[in-house]
Amino acid sequence: MVLMPRESAKLIATLSKDVFIEDEGVKNLACTVLEGIKNQRIHINNFSQHEFHPKPDDPRAIDWIFLLDVLNFSFWTQKNANKWKVNGQTGYFALCAAVKRAVDVSLHIYFYKCQV
């Protein structure tokens, strides 16, 4: 059984005791980012300084940035614990490498549509 990201997150949130998805909060964040790009307070060009970030001319860049920001909430590990690695990276940049790999193999990520 394969679930799309939204269905996977819903299943996890339903079964978890301490994890939940606040739909209105996710939608508000997406709309705030979109508004920031439209009024030029946020510049996509600043995001492309790392090899695992999207290029500014990638039409999926805003979705990519939004996904990274939503998932980038905690990379704390116990002292001396093994850290997960992707393409030799750990922490935030391992997350970026994993998302880039998914984008490179054409996995689709769906987001809320905002009216701004």
Image (cartoon, rainbow, N blue to C red):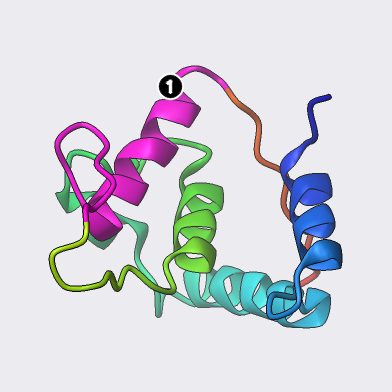
| Left or right: residue 66 compared with residue 76 | right
Q: Quadrant of residue 10?
A: bottom right
Residue furthest to the top: 105
Residue furthest to the front: 80
| Left or right: residue 22 compared with residue 73 | right
Decide if residue 55 is in sight here: no
- The mark total stands at 1
Q: Quadrant of the C terminus?
A: bottom right
Q: Quadrant of residue 9?
A: bottom right
Residue for badge 1: 104
Instruction: Give whichever of 60, 108 is nearer the camera.
Output: 108
Instruction: Give whichever of 112, 20 is nearer the camera.
Output: 20
The residue positioned 25% from the left and 58% from the top of the image is 91
The residue positioned 27% from the left and 69% from the top of the image is 77
- Whether 90 is drawn above or below 40: the answer is above
Instruction: Give whichever of 35, 104 is nearer the camera.
Output: 104
Q: Quadrant of residue 109?
A: top right
> How many neighbours does mark 1 have within 10 angstroms: few (below 14), some (14-19), or many (20 or more)?
few
- Whether 103 is drawn above or below 28: the answer is above
Picture coordinates of residue 74 (x, y %)? 39, 73
Decide if residue 7 is in sight here: yes
| Left or right: residue 31 compared with residue 62 | right
Report the magenta residues as a range: 82-106
The residue positioned 82% from the left and 63% from the top of the image is 15
Was residue 87 drawn as part of the magenta stretch in this picture?
Answer: yes
- Whether 93 is drawn above or below 58: the answer is below
Was residue 13 drawn as part of the magenta stretch in this picture?
Answer: no
Q: Quadrant of the N terminus?
A: top right
Picture coordinates of residue 34 (x, y %)? 59, 68
Amino acid type indicated by mark 1: Asp
- Whether 103 is drawn above or below 74: the answer is above
